[in-house]
Amino acid sequence: MSDNNSPPGSPKQNPAQNSETNLLPKDDSSLETIVRKIQDSMSLAKGHKFWETQPVGQFKDVGDTSLPEGPIEPPIPLSEVKQEPYNLPNPYEWTTCDMDSEDTCTEVYNLLKNNYVEDDENMFRFNYSKEFLSWALRPPGYYKSWHIGVRAKASKKLVAFITGVPARIRVRDEVVKMAEINFLCVHKKLRSKRLAPVMIKEVTRRVHLENIWQAAYTAGVVLPTPITTCQYWHRSLNPKKLIDVGFSRLGPRMTMSRTIKLYKLPDSPATPGFRKMELHDVPAVTRLLRSYLSQFVVSPDFDENDVEHWLLPTDGVVDSYLVESPESHDVTDFCSFYTLPSSILGNQNYSILKAAYSYYNVSTKTPLLQLMNDALIVAKQKDFDVFNALDVMHNESFLKELKFGPGDGQLHYYLYNYRIRNALRPSELGLVLL
Ligand SMILES: CC(C)(COP(=O)(O)OP(=O)(O)OC[C@H]1O[C@@H](n2cnc3c(N)ncnc32)[C@H](O)[C@@H]1OP(=O)(O)O)[C@@H](O)C(=O)NCCC(=O)NCCS
């Protein structure tokens, strides 16, 4: 196990691991669960030298109903925002990463490919593609200055990275301009030197310079204080490979051929009118999505530009399908998933695990179960090995029935400078961060 397996540096959970065969219920006394509970309680006990100084919900305030919901600190005049970057240790310098540049995109890709999030047992590491990074970091209205790198002054090598992108996030009936913070990564050789807090402060400063005072982010580690804690579930599409690479295990009294049969899917989707989303569908999908997301406590406030960017299919990055009623031609249902492969570390036969991640799904006419079964079918057609989903929104209603199994570890959601009085249930969350 590497250093990033234990707090404070443990990573955003890479869900690319399912140590149980999918049909087995998660054993709450499993070693991983016990270790995680100990780590979480250590996080509470040990204190957070950095996070305790930040405007985030603090552990000591949990359950204090006298504290109001909303911004923790008010905005300050822009002229009072620190104008110079924070100091880095002497051998390093800030760089703004121009994601339009193929070379810079490749440098970022390589830093993350070699140093980003791993699962607890260091068997898999996220391998975001260049196309994905370019998509994730350039939504409508993005700021280049929020794509922040750190280079070694001498070699100019990129050694750390953090990003923000702008988003409008609705919390109850308030739409708040926020930054979505992602891709925090410090080179393995530079860990535990307190570089992460400097990077977080620098991205915060640059967000403030755009007159934005709130942020949303996720992590696999417990920090002060999650607004909700979600679990990943996995649906095997290629069980043989998943077992061969150690992602899942053959269940007791199961043979490989019975397992393959168990996860077999029809060759094509069942729902009449199920088809890929196209550009002309943007207005209808936006209406469908806005109306669906309004029922959750926290969700993005998507307009047509956002939907075109985040949900119109992009090869190898995001896939979206909808149901167009054969009679009325109304768009009644929608489902989507994004492509995030993981490198398989140290396996002789395979180097890449092809994973689809459930994104936003809306059902009004087609039962969600049937819609998601069609999503599994198209993901299988596209040669994904596994389909992952969090227990957010209405996902719980189909996970077990569609043969998803619970994964290890949890994903915590956070807001910066915005207090939520009571933690949400995952099903109250309508937000998926990449
Ligand atoms: C996450 C990572 C950048 C942290 O760097 P590090 O060298 O381990 O830790 P540092 O000594 O620089 O900083 C430690 C501080 O950062 C905080 N921190 C660690 N991981 C964090 C995360 N994912 N999000 C926010 N803060 C985090 C710690 O809690 C600690 O602050 P505290 O004392 O208030 O608790 C690094 O471990 C890494 O690159 N890991 C792999 C990729 C990854 O997991 N990225 C995060 C995805 S959410």
Image (spheres, grey):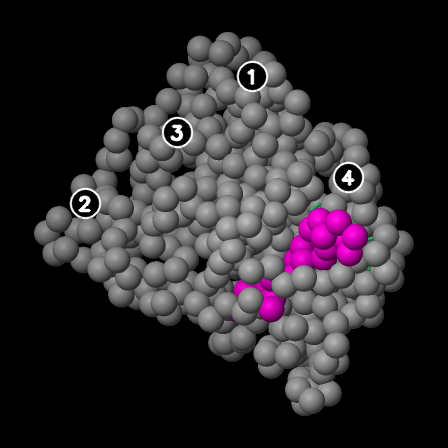
Q: Which mark is residue 273?
A: 2
Read off the magenta span: 145-166
Graded by Cα atoms within 10 Å as few (under 14), some (14 to 19) or many (20 or more), the crowding at tag 2 reads: some
Answer few, some or many: residues within 10 Å of disc 1's Cα (few below 14, many 20 plus, some between 14 and 19). Answer: few
Q: Residue at x 54, y 69 (%)?
A: 143
Instruction: Quote the CA–CA distance across marks 2 and 1.
Output: 39 Å
Q: Is residue 376 on the magenta stretch? A: no
Identify residue type, mark 2. Answer: Gly
Residue 41 location in percent, x, y?
82, 49
The chief SS type of the magenta part is: strand
Q: Which residue is mark 4?
A: 5
Q: Nearer the viewer, mark 2 or mark 1?
A: 1
Label 3 sits on a secondary structure element that is: loop
Is disc 4 in contact with disc 1, using a CB cutoff of under 8 Å?
no
Identify the element where label 2 is drawn: loop
Q: Which mark is residue 383?
A: 3
Regarding mark 4 in the picture, which secondary structure is present there? helix
Does the beta carbon at disc 1 come under 8 Å from ligand 1? no
Q: Residue at x 34, y 54 (%)?
A: 312
Given contact means CB atoms under 8 Å apart, are the residues at marks 3 and 2 in contact? no
Choose between 377 and 276: the one closer to the eye.
Answer: 276
Which label lies toward us, 1 or 3?
A: 1
Q: Which residue lies at the image location 56% right of the left edge and 46% below the top edge?
A: 106
Which mark lies nearer to you, 4 or 1?
1
Q: Are marks 3 and 4 in contact (CB under 8 Å)?
A: no
Inter-mark Cα distance, 4 to 1? 26 Å
**Mark found first going from the N terminus, 3 or 2:** 2
Between 150 and 382, the one nearer to me in the picture: 150
